[in-house]
Structure formats: C-alpha cells, structure tokens
Image (tube, grey):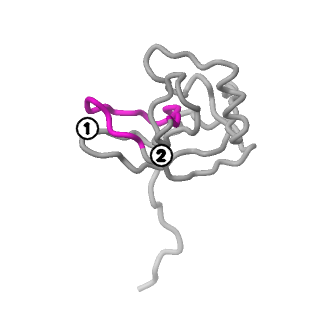
Amino acid sequence: MAKELHQKLGSMEYDGLITGLTPPIRVDGGIIAKMAAPTLLKRGTLLGKAGTGLLAAYDGTGTPDCILCDDTEVGTEADIPVEVYAAGCFDPQKVTLADGYTMTQADKDKLRAYSIVFKAASSAE
C-alpha cells in the first residue's frame, strides 16, 4: 500500500497580531507570576518584568519585555511557564495591555531594544 507524500497537519486562523517579517519572529520561554485571582491572559498580551524577574501583564510598572504567544490561564497556586515572542513585528491594535493602561512611546522605545516593533496591518482590499 502506497503512503501519501503529503498530508494536512493542521490549520490556523490569521489574527493579525504579526504584521511583518522584519525583525524576524523569535519565540522564547518565560514564567508568568501567579495572580491573586484566576485570570485568562489572551494571545498578544504585552508582558513586563518586575524586580522578581517574573512576567505579568504590563501596566506601566517594571519593564516591558515580550508578547504572549497563546491564551494562558494563570491561577493562584503556582507560576506558569509560557512561550513568548521575544522579537518580531506586531500590530499595536492587536496587542493587549493591562486594564486601564495605554502604551506610551517610551514603552515602544524600550521594546525596540529587544527587536519588538509595531506596525499596523495594511488592508488586504
């Protein structure tokens, strides 16, 4: 019996988070600090580092650091290892920030040092 030389392994929906090839996407690992209440952090959440070195949704304190790759449920019991985008080009309208916080130019400048840049997606029309 002949084996097929190709097969569909899966599919994904384009969400518009990644908007360019330069700088190249780089995925790395990080650890999100446990929270006071269980919280779902969405793909595209901007994460920052505090003095502990652990990540949390960026709210203007600490240093903006990376962007969350996948939706992640963060509980109250333990810190959670996650995959993060450590470099790449992202749509600023698709990046999620902590409630009530708006990204500043200073935040963008700090992230540029890590090769994280922002460019709005162009219309496909």
**Residue 104: horizontal and vertical position, in percent?**
64, 18
Q: How crowded is mark 1: few (under 14 residues within 10 Å), some or many (20 or more)?
A: few
Which residue is disc 1 drawn over? 76
Residue 45 in sight: yes
Point 54% across, 38% down: residue:
67
Q: How far apart are the alpha carbons under marks 1 and 2?
A: 30 Å
Quadrant, the C terminus: top right
Point 45% across, 83% down: residue:
2
Q: How crowded is mark 2: few (under 14 residues within 10 Å), some or many (20 or more)?
A: few
Q: Which of 74 and 124 is in front in this view?
A: 74
The label on residue 12 is 2
Q: Is mark 2 on a helix, strand or loop?
A: loop
**Residue 43: horizontal and vertical position, in percent?**
46, 36
Could you tell me the amino acid type at mark 2? Met
For the magenta stretch, what is the residue range? 32-50
**Residue 30: horizontal and vertical position, in percent?**
48, 49
Q: What element carries label 1?
A: loop
The label on residue 93 is none
Sequence-first disc among 1 and 2: 2
Point 41% across, 42% down: residue:
32
Q: Nearer the viewer, residue 25 or 108?
A: 108
Q: Which of 94 and 60 is in front in this view?
A: 60
